[in-house]
């Protein structure tokens, strides 16, 4: 099996790149941020709002969906896009990461991971082949190989063992993927923890196997940002220029900006929706905690210059009241406000890379965050 | 003080009526259903969806809003419409009912109710005058007099005492209302429990005082539907033809249909949003419980003939999954689906009354509910 290239690089500025990735369900402009619709829903948002906020592609969690409502059921209902009403590109993870973080009594063997469902305690086996089958049943535009992710800090021997297992699973994933739908893509995942040599080995071996794109996994698991950026710097140059690079589970706007500067094209993170549910807004002034009393009488919006209506129109006083009162609408508004901010950031990044002004954009954006929120009234 | 008439009766069909009520924030088509935005938010819905679903007017709860964020604060922020972004007519209740149902250590005296806030335990006094002041500060288009509502069943002596107290509070409310904004309205509330003579007395005395509209209170508090309808029949004929009649806290679609048939023009109820949060959908096939396993594999929408997009497009399987998974989106979708169904019902009622076909509409609508949901696949 060869891996057709669906990715077109449109521009470069330093190590930063911009491009377009063509999937069966539409085009993804890169650098791209993928909001996470864990269990077939974006928490607190309608799918039309996800789209209107500037989202090209979303992520669905294989682990959650295989347990409920079940991959075969979703396939019988026409796939995840038809099931949810999100009529756009979708990437699914392999399920491996959530098995590690959410399930009980898990056991990793050469062949598969066995675990008990966190929903009903049922015993489930997930192999690289079953993961690919589930992702095919879900109708993923982009499937991920199954891998084993080690939490940092960890012993080098543990990191190396998991990285080598992930490489063997990468080969099995690719073989299993041959029956996938036309145009669907499979990404390999570079592991190797915080050890540059292991990252090199993992990347080189994966490129040898050949994937439509390459993810960097096992980061944003508790290590400092400096370690994460060092691992990107160790990995990205090992990956083929013409394939998309996806940094899994990242991150803050600052993480994204720095990762783009080091050649990353795709991101996913629950942070904008999760923090939104906890009263936090992402803005060009940095993160703003709407619970703070200073907002209680403030009629000003979060950012009067924003292109997103709720960001420009809802008063801080109203958002403060909704958050303090535990009203669902507070979580709904802050989730869309945060997704819109992330997507505006990606839009601005793409433009800056296209125009060769990425370094200026990066500096002015960081300065805005560092300057902080507007003064209280 | 005279009470200008803002209500125009446009049609009658039997005892059923249709009309238009002009408020400072816009026109309300009657019969009207008012969704309840308790604490300055419609649970699980954006205001734009409330409007798009066909809502002319919403209800805000004085009790909740005076405790948090506070009436003076909302006034300083430009009133409840500006604060929330709901740019339409708003009715506020007096706060009396929630004092009875939510607060602790309440004490009713001739002058006022004193209670402890359910939020922070602070001691608060609510008099008829303060209630009107709070409603003025909130910017209500329609304010309600403060009353005392007795839970049924109750002794006649208790019902009569509360009814007489409510009449004295009605007079005080009207005097206090004189400083209200131009165009704002004040409604009196008929009490008298399940005793027709007390309802007659209450209605006659209120009409003597003179209000912009008349509410029937103290129903939908646990009594059978037959008692509620009998009380409407005892009360409505005592009220002036040319003023709107509002049945407070009601109810199911069936309650509304029967109350319209007896001359009621306005309703409010938390049922469409509350039941939506619990997985229940209101449809022309009656109430549907999306938790039921029969929906799990059903690709069909709730009602393929609905004019509301989510009702027509979201599969039962998806709604079932969202409800079972506890996803916020399930509550969001079912809340809008239910509000849209209620508003479609009101729209159809208004048309039927205008066209003189209300009895046919009532019969066919009841037959649809009685027939029940479409057969499983």
Image (tube, coloured by chain):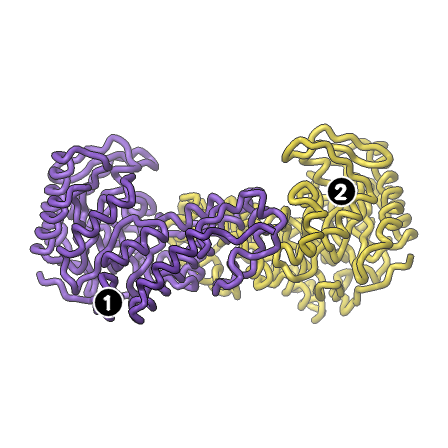
Chain colours: A yellow, B purple
Q: Residues within 10 Å of mark 1 (few under 14, many from 20)?
A: some
- The reply to whether residue B190 is visible in this rendering is yes
Query: Disc 2 marks which residue?
Result: A218
- What count of labels does the image hold? 2
Badges 1 and 2, same chain: no
User: Tag 1, which secondary structure?
Assistant: strand
x, y percentage for residue A28? 71, 63
Name the residue located 48 percent from the left edge and 62 percent from the top edge: B306
Q: Please report the residue visible at 67 percent of the width from the left and 59 percent of the height from the top.
A: A57
- Residue toward you, A228 or A27: A27
> What residue sits right under mark 1 in the picture?
B12
Drawn side of residue A164 relative to residue B175, left or right: right
Can residue A364 be seen in the rendering of this structure? no
Residue A314 in picture, x, y percent from top left: 43, 58
Q: Nearer the viewer, residue A241 or A100?
A: A100
Determine the residue positioned at 40% across, 56% down.
B367
Quadrant containing the C terminus of chain A is bottom left
Which quadrant holds residue A49? bottom right
Q: Nearer the viewer, residue A161 or B377?
A: B377
Subunit of mark 1? B
Q: CA distance from mark 1 to mark 2?
A: 70 Å
The image position of residue A374, as x and y in percent, is: 47, 56
Badge 2 sits on which subunit? A
Quadrant location of residue A29? bottom right
């Amino acid at each position: 099996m060869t891996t057709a290239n669906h990715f077109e690089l449109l521009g470069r500025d330093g190590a930063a790149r911009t491009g377009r990735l063509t999937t069966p369900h539409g085009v993804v402009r890169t650098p791209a941020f993928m909001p996470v619709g864990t269990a077939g829903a974006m928490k607190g948002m309608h799918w039309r709002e996800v789209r209107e906020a500037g989202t090209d592609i979303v992520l669905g969690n294989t682990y959650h969906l295989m347990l409920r409502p079940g991959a075969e059921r979703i396939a019988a209902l026409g796939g995840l896009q038809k099931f949810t009403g999100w009529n756009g590109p979708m990437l699914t993870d392999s399920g491996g990461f959530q098995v590690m973080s959410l399930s009980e009594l898990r056991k990793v063997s050469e062949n598969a991971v066995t675990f008990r469902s966190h929903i009903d305690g049922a015993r489930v086996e997930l192999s690289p082949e079953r993961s690919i089958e589930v992702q095919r049943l879900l109708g993923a535009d982009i499937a991920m190989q199954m891998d084993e992710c080690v939490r940092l800090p960890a012993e080098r021997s543990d990191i190396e063992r998991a990285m080598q297992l992930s490489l063997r699973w990468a080969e099995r994933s690719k073989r299993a993927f041959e029956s996938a739908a036309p145009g669907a893509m499979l990404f390999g995942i570079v592991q190797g923890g915080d050890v540059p040599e292991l990252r090199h080995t993992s990347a080189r071996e994966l490129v040898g196997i050949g994937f439509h794109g390459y993810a960097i996994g096992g980061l944003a698991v508790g290590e400092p940002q400096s370690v994460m950026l060092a691992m990107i710097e160790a990995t990205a140059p090992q990956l083929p220029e013409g394939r998309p690079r996806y940094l899994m589970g990242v991150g803050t706007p600052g993480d994204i900006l720095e990762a783009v500067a080091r050649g990353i094209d795709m991101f996913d993170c629950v942070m904008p929706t999760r923090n939104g549910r906890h009263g936090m807004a992402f803005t060009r002034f940095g993160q703003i905690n709407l619970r703070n009393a200073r907002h209680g009488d403030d009629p000003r919006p979060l950012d009067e210059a924003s292109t997103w209506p709720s960001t420009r129109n809802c008063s801080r006083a109203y958002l403060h009241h909704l958050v303090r009162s535990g009203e669902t609408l507070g979580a709904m508004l802050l989730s869309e406000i945060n997704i819109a901010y992330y997507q505006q950031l990606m839009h601005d990044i793409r433009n800056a890379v296209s125009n060769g002004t990425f370094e200026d954009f990066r500096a002015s954006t960081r300065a805005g965050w560092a300057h902080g929120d507007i003064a209280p009234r």
